[in-house]
Image: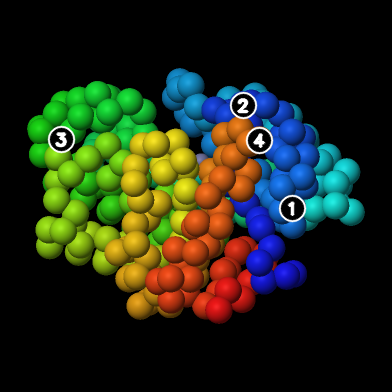
Amino acid sequence: MNPFSKYNFHTHSHFDDGKEPLEDFVQAAIEAGLKAYGFSGHSPLPFDNHWSLPKDVLPEYLAEAKRLREKYKHLIDIYVGLEIDYVPGYSENFSQLMDSCGLDYGIGSVHLVMKPGSKDPSDIWFIDGPREGYIEGIKTIFGGDARKAVLAYYMQQAAMVETQKPDIIGHLDKVNMHNKGALFDTASNWYRQSVDHLLDAVSGAGTIVEVNTRGVYSGKTDDFFPNNDILKRCLDRNIPVMVSTDAHHPSQVDRLFEDGTKVLKDIGFKKITTPFFELDIS
Ligand SMILES: [Zn+2]
Ligand SMILES: [Zn+2]
């Protein structure tokens, strides 16, 4: 593959919380010159929500994704995956889920933070909805202690990486999206240490860190997930990295892809590693 080929492995369609059918993403990807494309619908969850694949829709999603993989194979390499939520006590074992679905890859992500030690669904903090809910969760679930909440987020991600070994870890510092510098200090020792602990786990598991461009193009953050400081620490540990656009609409298949690649290059990364190929960006 050409070193400057475009690819994207993070996609949500009308099957989960994105817009438009999977085939529209494939056509948009071909048009934009992408050489490889992956689908990553949100894995089904055992409780009501408005964003993950309903369990009874999963077979249809997989069948359609596999049909497109075959139909377009002369034009683009298609990969079938899921963005799998890790919720201790609730989520399925990743490799069992991947085997039963016949997946090519999985992105492991934490959107729902379980209060440590609890199994009560009302103790789940949703970091990805509106900011009011995020702040309310810190108040009611973590007694107003943002530090406790954020530590739980990073511990849960580390446990996911250690026990489930996902191919890719999704938007590694998304917990900071609603912070706006107001609720906790990302320069504090405890924050840096919890990130370090996670990065050690990521390094040990051989998991790829994605640079997720969605926070920036959706206007929610100024930095990609994770930010440049964390990416530098990934480089220090030789952690493999790739760019993801987390497309929720066909117009987003390559949104800020080049900017994401440039950030990695500027930090000093010499190559991109996806679950399926490497690209030299030196
Ligand atoms: Zn996600
Ligand atoms: Zn996603």
In terms of secondary structure, where does tag 2 sit? loop
Q: Position of residue 105 (x, y in %)?
A: 63, 54
Mark 3 belongs to which amino acid? Phe
Q: Earlier in the sequence, mark 3 or mark 4?
A: 3
Q: CA distance from mark 3 to mark 1?
A: 46 Å
Horizontal arrangement in the rendering, residue 138 relative to residue 156 (left or right): left
- Front of the two marks 3 and 1: 1
Q: The N terminus appears in which quarter of the rendering? A: bottom right
**What mark, if any, has residue 142 been given in the picture?**
3
**What mark, if any, has residue 250 been given in the picture?**
4
Q: Position of residue 175 (x, y in %)?
A: 30, 44
In terms of secondary structure, where does tag 4 sit? helix
Mark 4 belongs to which amino acid? Pro
Q: Position of residue 188 (x, y in %)?
A: 12, 58
Q: The C terminus appears in which quarter of the rendering? A: bottom right
Residue indicated by mark 1? 33
